[in-house]
Image (tube, rainbow, N blue to C red):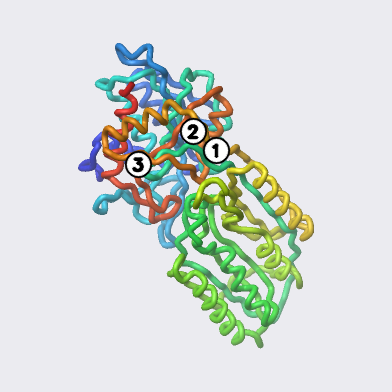
């Protein structure tokens, strides 16, 4: 029996469970893409699948609606694959283990993929429904949204006739988004030299238990970044005595605030007791800083027989200095919208190879000038430290439009259905509307979705009741004049 068979709307959750059973992390979307093609063939719908595995499915207008303006429904098929440390699932090969907890759908030990599997589920439920009175519907489903909106950047939109887009990739019922931040990816690499070193003991320092979260939606909540928190702890230790780094790693996605980080260091035997004391003191200080925003921080120290050659003398200091000199977190708040982060930076991935120390960041900004300034400042610091700076996969901000017929229609229908105003907001996270606005002249775009919480973390959960209300609302928008 299907796990979600009792959830309503039945067809939405039927498709959501189907999607969850198909592995679809970023860069691994071929199977889910082929599933969408099979759906289109089964329902005799026009479809396009490109070499990137983006998919467009088109359903012509129902009888009597041929003169209505086409509507683009849009979402992405990739998910952020995060999992608990003790979860052994291979998310590139295995489906998710869904379960229902009260009003929420969750996945055991992993992210849920509600971002953005719910968009696919809602779109397929609409496309299969022959009782729906609708204009020409154009469902656009992209790949690699979570790693720089790559699919949207590469898709050919020439099959589309619509100039109104309903993006289903935001996480708050009762709110529509009218603009978002732009962003990209920054990679920083510092050359390393290692050497054989005898007479040292090897210890592992680990930070865990952090909340993490989406680097756009949660960046303004003051949560700790595990990579930087561990760097600060090691700086406190280094101020007491020197040690040599052997390994340092943390995080797995640049757009997720890292929840865990680990360092392996070589320490002189006479400094072992001082190491224990200074790690605990530095850990206590950092825990006190994040007492409210991230209350369950755990810092552990253990001796290990892990092999590996440490870096040369002076390089540990250089690595820590570079990490702690580069900006991170909220850089600037918006001058136009109260409470909105304008510019931010997230050190999402940290790794240490044999010859280089590597950091991957997700920069975001709704201001092109602020984005450029941030990148220039980082490049300057990297140049001074002898590190390589690379900016890639940039995407534009989605700018607010004063006049939007689609937004006005949605606000009117929402008030009629629920007796309250639909909130119109801007967000700091990135959605694909900005990319499509550059491809489709005069695009009128809006983004919305049901209540999703703690996306990009294993705590992710989707509200069942909110999904039902959101689906009814989207259906009314599709059918409405």
Answer yes or no: do the residues labelled 2 and 1 have beta carbons within 8 Å? yes
Image side of residue 468 versus residue 440, left or right: left
Image side of residue 130 versus residue 289, left or right: left
Residue 349 visible, this orientation:
no
Does label 2 or label 3 sit earlier along the sequence?
2
Task: Identify the mark at residue 149; answer none if there is no mark.
Answer: 1
Task: Identify the mark at residue 142; answer none if there is no mark.
Answer: 2
Q: Please state which of residues 319 and 284 is positioned toward the viewer in this rendering.
A: 284
Does label 2 or label 1 sit earlier along the sequence?
2
- Asked if 232 appears above or below 22 in the picture, the reply is below
SS class of the residue under badge 1?
loop
- Asked if 228 appears above or below 378 in the picture, the reply is below
Of tags 3 and 1, the one toward the viewer is 3
Task: Identify the mark at residue 308; answer none if there is no mark.
Answer: none
**Residue annotated with mark 3:** 174
- Asked if 20 appears above or below 89 in the picture, the reply is above
Residue 98 visible, this orientation:
yes
Q: Please state which of residues 471 and 43 is positioned toward the viewer in this rendering.
A: 471
Q: Quadrant of the C terminus?
A: top left
SS class of the residue under badge 2?
strand
Query: In the rendering, at what x and y percent does residue 177 appear?
Result: 45, 39
Q: Please state which of residues 372 and 156 is positioned toward the viewer in this rendering.
A: 372
Total labels drawn:
3
SS class of the residue under badge 3?
loop
Image side of residue 321 versus residue 304, left or right: right
């Amino acid at each position: 029996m299907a796990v979600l068979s009792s959830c309503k709307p039945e067809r939405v959750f039927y498709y959501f469970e189907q999607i969850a059973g198909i592995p679809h992390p970023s860069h691994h979307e071929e199977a889910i893409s082929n599933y969408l093609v099979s759906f289109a063939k089964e329902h005799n719908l026009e479809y396009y699948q490109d070499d990137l595995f983006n998919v467009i499915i088109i359903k012509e207008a129902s009888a009597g609606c041929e003169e209505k303006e086409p509507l683009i429904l849009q979402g992405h098929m990739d998910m952020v694959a995060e999992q608990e440390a003790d979860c052994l699932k291979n998310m590139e090969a295995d489906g998710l283990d869904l379960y229902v907890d009260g009003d929420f759908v969750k996945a055991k030990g992993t992210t849920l993929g509600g971002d953005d599997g719910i968009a696919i589920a809602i779109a397929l439920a609409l496309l299969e429904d022959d009782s729906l009175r609708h204009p020409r519907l154009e469902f656009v489903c992209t790949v690699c949204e979570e790693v720089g909106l790559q699919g949207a950047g590469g898709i050919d939109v020439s099959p589309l006739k619509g100039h109104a887009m309903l993006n289903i990739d935001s996480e708050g019922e009762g709110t529509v988004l009218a603009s978002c931040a732009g962003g990209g990816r920054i990679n920083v690499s510092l050359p390393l030299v290692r050497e054989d070193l005898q007479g040292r003991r090897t210890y592992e320092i680990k930070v865990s238990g952090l909340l993490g979260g989406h680097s756009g939606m949660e960046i303004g909540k003051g949560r700790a970044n595990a990579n930087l928190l561990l760097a600060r702890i090691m700086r406190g230790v280094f101020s007491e005595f020197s040690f040599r780094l052997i390994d340092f790693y943390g995080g797995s996605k640049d757009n997720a605030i890292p929840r865990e980080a680990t360092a392996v260091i070589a320490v002189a035997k006479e400094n072992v007791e001082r190491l224990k004391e200074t790690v605990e003191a530095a850990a206590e200080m950092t825990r006190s800083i994040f007492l409210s925003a991230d209350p369950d921080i755990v810092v552990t120290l253990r001796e290990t027989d892990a092999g590996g050659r440490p870096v040369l003398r002076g390089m540990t200091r250089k690595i820590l200095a570079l990490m702690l000199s580069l900006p991170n977190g909220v850089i600037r708040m918006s001058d136009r919208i109260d409470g909105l982060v304008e510019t931010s930076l997230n050190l999402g991935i940290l790794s240490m190879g044999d010859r280089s120390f590597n950091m991957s960041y997700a920069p975001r900004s709704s201001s092109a000038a602020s984005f450029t300034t941030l990148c220039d400042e980082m490049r300057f610091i990297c140049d001074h430290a002898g590190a390589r700076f690379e900016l890639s996969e940039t995407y534009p901000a989605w700018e607010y439009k004063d006049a939007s017929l689609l937004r006005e229609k949605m606000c009117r229908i929402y008030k009629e259905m629920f007796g309250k105003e639909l909130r119109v907001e801007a967000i700091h996270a990135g959605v694909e509307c900005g990319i499509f606005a550059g491809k489709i002249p005069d695009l009128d775009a809006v983004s919305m979705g049901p209540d999703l919480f703690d996306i990009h973390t294993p705590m992710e959960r989707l509200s069942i009741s909110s999904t039902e209300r959101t689906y009814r609302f989207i259906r009314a928008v599709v059918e409405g004049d």
